[in-house]
Image (cartoon, grey):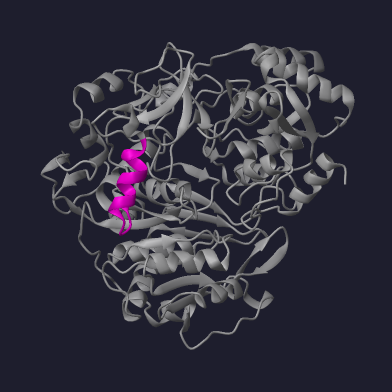
Amino acid sequence: MSDSEETQLEARLAEQEAFEPPAEFVEQANVSDPSIYEEFEDDWPDCWERAADLVDWETDYDEVLVDDDEPFYEWFVDGELNASHNCLDRHLDSRGDELAIQWEGEPGDTREFSYAELHREVNEFAAALRDLGVEEDDVVTLYMPMIPELPMAMLACARIGAPHSVVFAGFSADALATRMNAADSQFLVTCDGYYRRGDALDHLSKADDGLAGVDHDTTTVVVDRLGDDHDHALGDDHFDYDDLVADHAGADVDPVTRDAEDMLFLMYTSGTTGEPKGVKHTTGGYLSYVSWTSHAVLDVKPEDTYWCAADIGWITGHSYIVYGPLALGTTTVMYEGTPDHPDNDRLWELVDGYDVTQLYTAPTAIRAFMKWGEEYPDRHDLSSLRLLGTVGEPINPKAWKWYYRHIGDESCPVVDTWWQTETGGMMITTLPGIGTMKPGSAGPPLPGVDARVVDADGEEVAPGEAGYLTVDRPWPGMLRTLYKNDERFIEEYWDAYSDSGNDEWIYFPEDGAKIDDDGYITVLGRVDDVINVSGHRLGTMEIESAVVDVEGVAEAAAVGGDHEMKGEAVYTYVILEDGYEEDEETRERVIEGVEEAIGPIARPEEVIFTPELPKTRSGKIMRRLLEDIANDDELGNTSTLRNPDVVDDIEAKVTGD
């Protein structure tokens, strides 16, 4: 393609506001009949039997939903099943020799497990856990990076009816101790270390430091990931994973029958009080919901090689690396390292090498890919891709179009998915075989999901107006409560929107949003991600999208800073694409871009150029710290950042020190 043709193509994409799913995709899509929305509405809640039909039930359920004790809803009442059986045993006859997990370590080492091989190792480790004293309903904490033993341990726990609590490997020792104490967890599975950007990191020392803060006796299993690269000593209460599995070679553990409402896992997430919340997900509703959304939204089929490039330490990895894909019998890809090691094309090398069919990743990663440039994906054959997805935060139109063009070659639908730890699975997105895609807008609520945008009185807002995102009906994948804290569950998720005067249950995820004439919802970010300039409430995402639309800008963050006249003023922190200068001309183009897109009221007070933004280990921008810098306040805690050094660099630029 000539430079002129390329320029014309990019110009067309920049102007285009909606995209239809490719006809070739629609023809093979798992879900392609638009009437599904009406059918789910007419048949609610029995419509969710479609989700339940995707899993095996040992005992059939009597009722789809019991709602006489809201908000403590019960789904698939009196049904019985086992999640490990659904992810493994039922596939053995038809797919026993097919790959379940395709894993690659950062140094390039690989391991793969067929369904039969995964079934064998899960059984052996389940037997080992039982011998160590793990009983049904005991919470087992898993503190591991992206190695195959993590999903194996999850499925082994599920097999014996022991809920697991996965703690992200990047979290601190204190975070591990806090979560083990909160869950009364007496069992830990961890590893000696893992690789990150070429270095072998010592993980066991951090785990041991965390165990020192646990206020009860514990038993620990240690996976040897690093081998000869890292010697590690085991304490008296530590057991070697490989030895345990070898001691139980050939073990066959019958899956424990679990009630649909029995807990499958705990997932600790941030809370408004500062204490992490133990979100409880149950076996029947959760497994059915993630299976259905994997089938309908990600278009997962058994013959696929599917890759969700998240971390299992977060809910995305639980739902769309482990339980959803394995329940559907597909091959799920796992990668240990970062996308920029040893070079910026590592992800595309993996997509090419494994013939990946779906890629589900975060907007923060896509913005990094944009910054690095299309020459990196251009090195590889990405034609195996059939569908692209985004998760974790709203994606701006510029990044969406770059992803669609340079990764999907305009032949892959892009599903921009909104959901949370508490929802268990996707809630708002287009169905790729049906819906028109609008860059920057997640899409309509999924069939059966009653998401709305309302004002402070609970009334639905007019198209184009900003409001609060709410969900007005329960759904199977929803959290059931907070672990051992029903009162906090009600306070945070039921009473949070009670000022509207609505006596009926409403789930309030604390996100702002807009809705258009077609019912497409654009999520604007957390309701506290709002800048109040002279009485005008401006969403940070809206400003950031305007900045990123400026030529040469790869990523941006907008925050509010104190201002004597305006109350608050807009401060923008800007990362430029390679080859663009941090000069006054670029600064003026950023300011003009914001004024043209939103208006003079949103004019940035400051444009601060930076090579990085402070981000949590899950990739979310830490705007609170940027606000502290803008206001010259004392900086808050930076220990949860994956790049804490950047904060000092940005502060020096702002203050001139």
Placement of 517 over or under 317, stated as above or below: above
Judge whether 81 appears above or below 1 on screen: below
Q: Residue at x 13, y 50 (%)?
A: 78
Chief secondary structure of the magenta portion: helix
Residue appearing at x 70%, y 26% in the figure: 548
**Spot occupied by residue 74 in the image (x, y as percentages of width and height):** 20, 45
**Nearer to us in this view, 129 or 352:** 129
Q: Residue 3 in the image: x percent, y percent?
A: 81, 18
Query: In the current view of this chain or complex, which residue is farthest to the bottom?
Result: 236
Whole-percent x, y for residue 27 in the image: 41, 22
Q: Residue furthest left?
A: 62
Q: Residue furthest front?
A: 564
Q: For this rendering, which residue is in front, 313 or 587?
A: 587
Which image quarter: residue 535? top right
* Quadrant location of the N terminus in the rendered image: top right
Give the quarter of the image for residue 420: top left
Asked whether the viewer can see residue 447, the reply is no
Task: Name the one closer to the observer, 210 or 54.
Answer: 210
Residue 164 located within the stretch drawn in magenta: no
Left or right of 165 in this view: 627: right
Task: Locate residue 106: give its quadrant.
Answer: bottom right
Q: From where the camera sits, is residue 478 visible?
A: yes
Picture residue at 25% right of the left edge, 49% below the top: 284
- Nearer-the-camera pick, 362 or 462: 462
- Looking at the rendering, the stretch of residues picked out in magenta corresponds to 482-496
Where does residue 582 sit, x and y in percent of width and height?
86, 32
Q: In the rendered structure, does residue 486 fall within the stretch colored magenta? A: yes
Question: What residue lies at 74% left-to-right and 53% top-to-bottom?
Answer: 342
Q: How many numbered marks have been drawn onto this rendered protein structure?
A: 0
- The relative height of residue 399 versus residue 657 in the rendered view (above or below) is above
